Amino acid sequence: MRRLRAAAVPYLLIMPGGLWLIIFFAIPVVALLSLSTQQGDVVHGFTQTFHFANYAYAWDNYHDQFIRSLIYGGIATILCILLGYPVAYWIAFRGGAHKSTYLFLLLLPFFVSFVLRTVSWQYFLSDNGLLLAPLKSAGIVPQNFRILATAPAVIGGLTYNYLPFMVLPIYVALERIDFKLVEAAQDLYASRATAFRRVVVPLSLPGIFAGVLLTFVPVAADYVNASILGGTSNTMIGNIIQDQFLNSQDFPTGAALSFMLMALLLIGMFSYARALGTEEVLEAAAR
Amino acid sequence: MTKNGRMLSRRNALRLGGASAAAMGLAACGVQGAAKQQSTAQAESAADKFWKAQKQTGQVNFANWALYIDPSHTTLKDFTAATGIKVNYSEVIQDDSSYFAKINPVLSSGQSTGADIMVITDGLQFDELVELGEVIPLDQSMLTNFHKNAGTPYQHRSFDPGNIYSVPWASGVTGIAWNPKYVTQPPTSIADLWNPKYAGHVGMMSDPQEIANFGLFKIGVDPVTSTESDWHTAASQLMQQRNSGIVRQYYDQSYINALSKGDTWITMAWSGDIFQQNLSSGTNLQFVIPKEGGTIWTDNMMIPKYAPNPVAAMKLIDWFYKPEMAALLTEAINYITPVPAAQGIISAAAAKASGSDKATLGAVASSPLVWLSADEYSRVKNYVPITSKNRASFYSIFQPVTAG
């Protein structure tokens, strides 16, 4: 009896979280999948007709925004690595006694709402705003120059908003590295650059992987930055999906787009994991 | 006095359909709303039966848009003092589309939303609520103030003939606003939004129903009588405007900030916003109804199905048609009131007031944006009537414009 009870414990432990995911993730996802092949409208209702043409329609009309989202997501993620890695490195190895203070500073922007931070960017970057007004009056940039409503503004906003999601996992990975390994490499006549490249980077790879996961996925699906900082040709797929559900009330197309995005991201992530050395990285990332 | 009105997210707010004053000129065109499944007579007899069974209750729940009432709620407090009915006022409506998305599943599953009065713009969602039978026909016998005091155009609205499901809360016009600092020659025509001189500084709205109308004005077509081939022509004009780099962005409510900051110089705009912005921030923005036409919209009070306090709701709806209440409301929100007598009351209040109150009240009482002239009434048009039949093609034509 006792053995039986002991065997049940792991299942009992997983039950609350498992149920939570089944009810609030699995069921809606299945419902959405079913919606994506339905036809109809809000007044007369939607009926299941296995109308797979919804997917073709969605791709034909919105492939530009799809590809754009992946490109913006890719650029923002790379920028996050370039900006975030040195920060994480510095905090992990040079932070000394104040590590937690630096981490807190890094997280400080999160105490201000995401939308509010993006809107404040809008003020800062506006044509005659804090940044551009002095540059224009000094003649450094032409009068008609603008940052808002351009692709760099959107990518910049995305990078800024998701940077901490890159820094934290990299920091965690770096923090675990025994610095003696680096010293050992140098003892064996590795230059500092070589030691960094051959020892530190490989050991921090799981952190980078986790960081890429945490940034690329939400960045590619983001719609706030494009709608606040973007212009007429910076619409991302998240904006389109939101529009389908709220404006056009074209639920099937919205659902089809959501699934295509999910599939693209999953395929991308798994091929990326494979390139980096298969599932071991996934496990390492979860450590 | 306060800056007021719907300065917050009026995202996708303003919806198609017919509207108020324009009905004067357009009634003859035989405007069709979305397919109403009930005839007027059927709706009336259903309403009679419903209302006979109702009892007065001591409370009413009012769902409205943000910043869309006098901030001290004097209008509501007076109502409670006069009737003993408590008003539970909440600002839960961000825009028609998201509010509809919230309440439709509740109502279609037979549950009450808790609201007794909700404010819905004439347009797609308005028509859908009626088509779905998710609103209660009003008790006409309880609308005494409305019948006595509402202006003629507001008693004959093309999207709800006979005022069966709704009466107006306030109206406004979509026209062109500009910042005189950058635009020296006052615009008069829709074509000014296509002027290459302003390339990169023209603001257009993100709502397909708003830009559709402006595209149609550009090609000289009345939106109400427009055909699908007109829509294609209008959309190609809008595409050309976008692709040649003239449009800076397709805006929601944030267009007003872009205009004030100088990011846009000339933009599509809602009348009341411009008035409020000038009043509150000291800007000198200008507004015009272009010679080809502007769009008039009306926000309406409706009673959702399963409302717990319908009798109290009717009393409150009619309460706002007392001229003194309409005046208090207009002073605060600066949109077009359906009660013309309010103007005299505001003028009288301005004459008695002093200091900054006097100036503000005077400005409201004489504002051409709040009290349209007969000439302006003749130029404002309704939105393209969207039905469940043409909705899909309408959106497939106009959505690609803003989804660049």
Image (tube, coloured by chain):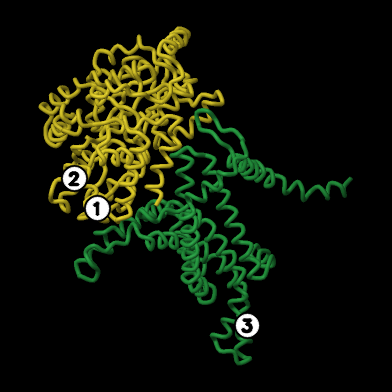
Chain colours: A green, B yellow
Name the residue that disc number 3 marks: A180
Name the residue that disc number 1 marks: B261
Residue B36 badge: none
Above or below B110: residue A23: below
- Residue occupying image coordinates x 32% and y 58%: A148
Q: Foreground: A206 or A229? A: A229
Q: Comparing marks 3 and 1, which lies closer to the viewer?
A: 1
Q: Quadrant of the C terminus of chain A?
A: bottom right
Marks 1 and 2 sit apart, C-alpha to C-alpha, by 11 Å
Residue at mark 2 shares a chain with residue at mark 3: no
Q: Foreground: B8 or B39? A: B39
Per the image, label 2 sits on a secondary structure element best described as loop
Label 1 Cα crowd, 10 Å radius (few <14 / some 14-19 / many 20+)? some
Residue A112 placed where, x, y %? 42, 53
Q: Is residue B131 left or right of residue B367?
A: right
- Residue occupying image coordinates x 23% and y 31%: B380
Marks 1 and 2 close (CB-CB < 8 Å): no
Name the residue that disc number 2 marks: B285
Per the image, label 1 sits on a secondary structure element best described as helix
Q: Foreground: A170 or B187? A: B187
Q: Foreground: A244 or A51? A: A51
Per the image, label 3 sits on a secondary structure element best described as helix
